[in-house]
Every structure is written in C-alpha cells, then in structure tokens.
Image: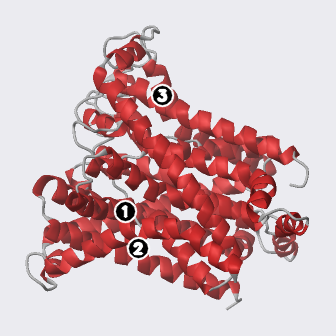
Amino acid sequence: MIAKLRSIWLVLPAVLLIGICFIYPVAWLLQRSVSEPVWGLQNYAEIFTKSIYLGVLWNTVTIAGVTTLLCALFGFPVAYSMVHSRPWLRKLLIFVVLIPFWTSILVRSFAWLVILQGGGIINDFLTGVGLIAEPLELVYNRLGVLLGMVQVLLPFMVFPLYSVMARIDGSYVKAATNLGANPIRAFFRIYLPLCLPGLLTGAMLVFIISLGYFITPALLGGRGDIMIAQLIFERIDEFGDWALASALAIVLLVGTALLFGFVSLLLKLRGKGV
Amino acid sequence: MFYSARFWGGLRGVINLLLAVYMLAPLVVILIISFSSALFLSFPPPGFSLQYYEKMFSNPTWTRTLWTSVKIMVPSAVIATVLGTAAALALSRMESRWAVLIRGLLMAPLIIPVIITAAAIFGVFRIWGLYGTLPGLILAHVILTLPYVMSTVSANLAVFDKRLEDAAANCGAPPFTAFRRVTLPLISPAVLSGMLFAMVISFDELIVSLFLSTPTIRPVTVQMWSNIRGDTDPTIAAIATVLFLFSLFALLIDGLARRKSGRAPGL
C-alpha cells in the first residue's frame, strides 16, 4: 500500500503536465469546434458539404492510401531481403532504412527539392546530356509528395514485416512446392498469408501517420496536393479561422482514433486465432 | 530462368541497391553541396570550400536561431527525462487497470497527429501568455518528448529483475539508496537513450515550434522552413548537415552506451 502511494507521487507530475498542457488544450479545441461562432455542428456541416474541404479530405485519403500501397510494394521485397541476407548485409540494410528516420524531415524535404526541382540535379543532368529540352515537373506535384513520404514512412512498413517474416518457418513453403504447387502459387497461398499480420500492422501504421502529414506535402506538393494538416495550419496562421481549423483537427483526430481502435481490435482477434 | 536461384538473387541485389540509392542519395547530395565552392546551387560542385559553414556561423540569423534551439532542447530534454523516467518507474509497480489508463494518457501525444497537438497548444498557450516565449516552447517540447523517454525506460524495466531491488531492501538499504545504487545504474543506459532521443526530437521539431514561435524567439528549424520556401540557398545545406551530424552523434553515443551496458554483469 505504501509503495503504491509512492508510485502515485512519482507519476503525478507527468500526468498533471500532460493533463494541463495537452488533454485540456485538445478539449478546448473540441469545444471551439462546436461553439464558434455559435453553438452547433455548422463547422462540421461545412467541411462535409463544401467542395474545397471535401477536396482536401479526398487528397488526404488518396495520398495516404497511395503512400501505403507504395510502401507495401517496396517494403515487402526489402523486408524479405533483410530476413534472407547474411548478418552483415542485414545490419547494413537496417541502417539504411533507419537513416531517414534519424534525419530531420526538413533536411530530407530540402534534399528532395535540390534533386527534383526545375533547375535541380536530375533536370540539369537530363537537359545537359540532351535527353530532354524542357525540365520535367518532378516536384511541387503529387510525384514529389509521394517520393518524399514513402522514403520517410518505409521503416514503419519494413520493421513489422521483418519481425513477422523472420519467424516464418521455411518448411511450409517447401512442403507446398514438394506437394506440387509452383513457386508462385506457393507464395500466394502459403507465404503471403503468413506475412499478413505484419503487412496489416505496417499498412495501418503508414496510413495513420500519413493522414496527419504536414511538412513533406507542404514543401514538395503543389496547390492541388493540400492535405488536411496543411489546411489546418493555413486556416489558423493566415486567417485566424479557429472555427474551421478546430473542426478539421477534430475530424482528423476522430478518424485517426477510429482507425487505431479498429486495427487494435483486428490484431487482438487475430491473436486469439479467430 | 524464372525459377532459377540466380534470377531471384539478382533481383534481390537490384532491390537492395535501389533502396540504398533512394534512402541515401538525398543525404549524400546535401553533404556534398554544403561543401561546395560554387556561389549558387550547382551539382556536382566545381570545387570544395567551407564558405557556407562560414556564412552560417557569421550570419546572426542562423547563430541566433541555432542558440534558441539549444536553449529549448536542453531544458526540455532534462525535464522530459526526469518526468518520463519517474512515470515509467511508477507504472512498472502499479499492476492495475490504472497503469494501463495512465500509460495510454501519457503516450497520447505520440499517437495523435502532431498538427492537432500544435493547434491545441497554440490556442491555449496564447490565452495563457505562453505564446512566443521560451517557457512555452520548452513546455510544448516536453509534451512531445516525454512519451519517447517513458516508452524507452519502460521497455528496459520490463526486462529488469525487481528481485535485485528487493534484495537491496532486504539487506537493509533504505528505498532511495536501493534505487540509487541498484535500480538506477541498471536502467541508466535506457534513461540516457531516452534523453538522447528527446534531444534529437526537440532539435528537429518544426510543427509545434512553427505555431508557438515569433520572429524574436525562433528555433533554427522554423528559420529553415521560411527560407526553404523562398529559395534553395546552399547555406541551408550546411545547416542541414549540422542537424544531421547532431542526430548521428546522438545515435553513436547511444550505441556506445548500449554496448557498454551489454558487457555489464547481470544484464
């Protein structure tokens, strides 16, 4: 009992801090969203009916979706390669995947700008050797956003996949091929389903994190690639429009929370063998 | 050919190479450009010089903002480390539904998108007069980094043998002595790791700082943000390199600490 009481004193400062400086502000935001300028759900109605806001919501979901897909397509062979490499190569691959994780998002976005823009490295090279006359539009559009986002989010796909793949017993696939399945069939019927928990965890992580992305799309995207986070920032920074900004933030919060809850439930069910 | 081991081995090699280029090329380009002798952005550079580093350290805008970043990073990392470690220790002893609830509460800033945290904190801090102040920025960074420290220390405590502390207590050590002489040395690599993590995150943080900073109190990342959007001045490459080297340095210290603790008896 005494030990328990002491534990409460140890955790209390952190709880108070998070409560006052995080939970209260988020609650304040929620309250603003339904009380600005008058009480009611008018701000939410506006978001879900006006085409500009629907467009941004659509951008957010599609960019997150395509990023997730690309991360899965690229992350799968990378994770497979990690599992089936010699230890030194595996360590090197893990290091390479984690490097962007340890560099500031600003640094990475700036690097992509230098490489991709009109007078950037790729265009300079291609015009220099005479392959193209006009610079290609590689950035300030969807392509730039996706290149930047997949690079940052790849680790969230690779590591869940890696941990699942490392535990897969190779004899299952061997048994399938011995029984006459061709390797492609064995892959789709045996190997892929075994990887599914990792793939699902990775996909959900990438998708959820993508939904709230701000810096990369803001720097590498164009006017047609505005995602919800950037809209929230602009609404507050340029217009001081708390009514819409707070409602958008709550939409993002609820969307993220619902997805998170859904995935936890799914993984729990799978864990029970359902 | 399709089924041959050579084909698949080759394909794996290609994928590995593609990965390396994709992940590393941007960083390598930044490093090279930061040492360029050209007067504007050009690649490959005609020669090498330290002019952009000189520019960075002689331009008060960059030195001032770098210093502001340090003034935010150090106190916030220390506070987050103390509070996060204390919370992790307390939670490891509370085996109840409360522990789950409190852990969820303290991890929340890590799970919900930073833009929401930023907007919410900005709104409330403006009312409280913390907007555009050093304490306000420090407090906000503590909120963001505390979950990292707590989860790092918690992961370490999960494999920590509580009987060691009990043994110390049974031998007559007062609780605080048992903690200081037994528990703390055993978890100190994780605490250090959490603090380094907190420092790197604070130093690289942009979104919350963007909301809370003013032209007078402005961390280096916010300054970079406003400059990047205008043009691609190679000085930014020099600053980017400094930021990257800082992360690498933290990673290195962390690795060394882990290796050292790996050799320590009992772990």
Per the image, the residue denoted by label 1 is A212
Which residue matches tag 3?
B242
Looking at numbered disc 3 in the image, what kind of residue is underneath it?
A: Val
Residue at (68, 47) in percent of width and height: A94
In depth, the one of A15 and B150 nearer the eye is: A15
Residue lying at the far left of the rendered structure: A37
Q: Position of residue B202 (x, y in %)?
A: 46, 46
Q: Is residue A71 left or right of residue A163?
A: left
Q: Is residue B189 visible?
A: yes
Image quarter of residue B154: bottom right
Question: Residue A34's mark?
Answer: none
Query: What residue type is disc 2 on?
Result: Thr
Tell me the quadrant of the picture where the N terminus of chain A can be found. Answer: bottom right
Q: Position of residue B146 (x, y in %)?
A: 52, 58
- Between B53 and B228, the residue placed more toward the observer is B53
Discs 2/3, front: 3
- Judge depth for marks 1 and 3 and give the one in front: 3
Let me know if marks 1 and 2 both belong to one chain: yes
> Which one is in front, B66 or A43?
B66
At label 2, counting other C-alpha atoms closer than 10 Å, the crowd grade (few under 14, some 14-19, many 20 or more) is many
Q: Is residue A86 visible?
A: no
Q: Position of residue A25 (x, y in %)?
A: 31, 69
Residue situated furthest bottom in the rendering: A274
Whole-angstrom CA distance, mark 1 to mark 2, is 9 Å
